[in-house]
Image (cartoon, rainbow, N blue to C red):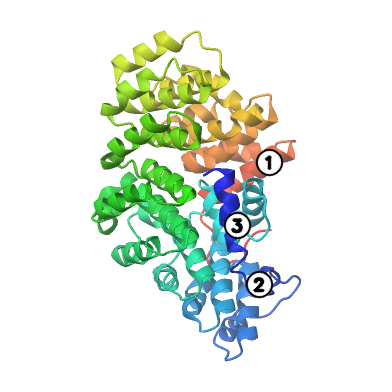
Amino acid sequence: MSERVLAGIVAGLLLWLPAGAAAAAAPPQGRQVAFEQVVESLKSPDAKARLGAIQLLREAGYLEAAPAIAPLLADPDDRVRAAAIEGLVSMYLVDERHTREFGRGLIREKGATLPLYAFVQREGVTIPNLAPPEVIRGLIGAAASPNLRIRFDAAYALAVLGRPLVRQGQFPDGRAAVNALMAILREPDPLMRLAATHALGRLMGAARQSPGASPELTAQRTEVGDQIVVGMNDPDEDVRLASMGALGEMRYERGVQSLTDLYNYYKKGVEGMTALDALAKIAHPGSLPVFLAQLGHREAHIRRLAIEGIGRTGDEAAMREMESRTGRDQSPYVTYARAFARALNRDYSQLPKLVEGFKYSLLESDTFDYLVELGPPAAAELAALAANKDQKVRAGIAEVLGITGSQASLETLAALAADRADLVAAAAERSQKRLVPRDRAAPRAR
């Protein structure tokens, strides 16, 4: 998602925020009230009391309070519904402060809400505890709210809290969720179509990773994918770009021809790049001629995407041709993409070079995405590089191990949590929280 698209989201969102909403979203400090008393206040006829209870529970982070907050997703007061959505998202975040800082690095305008910040963080945003069914069902209901801001936040919250459930085959009422988001996808407001496109792409992308575990979602894959293909002709440019990105996240092969036609039409610019990026993510064998034809392109980012696409296909002949034609290419984008393509095909010889990308601001994001995509098979190799001399590299490895690693990674993360560099220690501590479930009856660690 480009910064320009994100700026458009927030500019529109500011129009929806009720007066005082930003102040109401800030959790109170220094208040200690009995847990049972606060939960009981969620049922108060006074909207202010319900708001206060949500904020106290949000601050404390007691996961066992989530089912009690869920009914407020249908509260008659829009302020309470908005607070319930943000409060529930907050409770399942690894580190809300980090999520906000990360989000603000992409969304520079004021007014973005927590579900959007959590969505743009993408990987490693939530703890391993799964949101209970009551929360997901409540968010599905909130996605049909007459209030634009509630529907907007509910869509992004479904993407954030629903993705881990989809991956583990525990997402409830998948058909109802898709129907709710598809209804938003047909709304006249482009910001709402944008939110639905993002959420559907995220959930369907997760379903692709575990199709047997998410039959309700995979059963609707074609219906959703074809509708998102239609979105590539939307009158709003941001929706068109989001549609391409969602097809890439879904790895939707039925969209390959349309994406190819778009790339051949634009060739360059944001729409051409986004179409090629989606093709590279889908990595259909039929796209190999497109990828191979771009290896000599004058723009390094186009060559990078072509290499990524070739690497994801795993085609041995195409890999050999790619190596032959780009072996002398000194663009850092190309050399790092080539290392990624090799690692995807279980050649980890260039992994030490790949992690060096964390040193450079222009390569940091790509490096993170590459290592996350390599997944658990590369985790042991990655842990062996955690003693790198550069603190940015150690911090990057720490972040990734919390996403792709396992309990076996905790020893490495414990060592990194004791690192002298605060940057590294903080990243390792976040990753420990990603791998170790939180006690539902305990407050959130500070």
Q: Which residue is mark 2?
A: 21
User: Residue 247, position in %: x, y?
Assistant: 36, 44
Q: Is residue 173 left or right of residue 236?
A: left
Q: Callout 2: 10 Å neighbours few (<14), some, many (20+)?
A: some
Q: Nearer the viewer, mark 2 or mark 1?
A: 2
User: Residue 47, position in %: x, y?
Assistant: 60, 86
Tell me whether the residue at label 3 lies in contact with that at label 2, contact meaning CB atoms closer than 8 angstroms. Answer: no
**292 or 366, which is in the foreground?**
292
Q: Callout 3: 10 Å neighbours few (<14), some, many (20+)?
A: many
**260 or 211, which is in the foreground?**
260
When the figure is inspected, residue 73 is found, relative to residue 174, above or below; the finding is below
- Disc 2 element: helix
Q: Nearer the viewer, mark 3 or mark 2?
A: 3
**At x 37% / y 36%, what residue is drawn?**
262
When the figure is inspected, residue 167 is found, relative to residue 393, above or below; the finding is below
- Disc 1 element: helix
Quarter of the rendering occupied by the C terminus:
bottom right
Marks 3 and 2 sit apart, C-alpha to C-alpha, by 15 Å
User: Residue 425, position in %: x, y?
Assistant: 68, 41
Report whether residue 52 is seen.
yes
Image quadrant assignment for residue 155: bottom left
Which of disc 1 and disc 2 is earlier in sequence?
2
When the figure is inspected, residue 421 is found, relative to residue 115, above or below; the finding is above
Q: Which residue is mark 3?
A: 10
Q: Which residue is mark 1?
A: 425
User: Residue 121, position in %: x, y?
Assistant: 55, 48
Query: Which kind of residue does numbered mark 2 sit on?
Result: Ala
Query: Which kind of residue does numbered mark 1 sit on?
Result: Ala
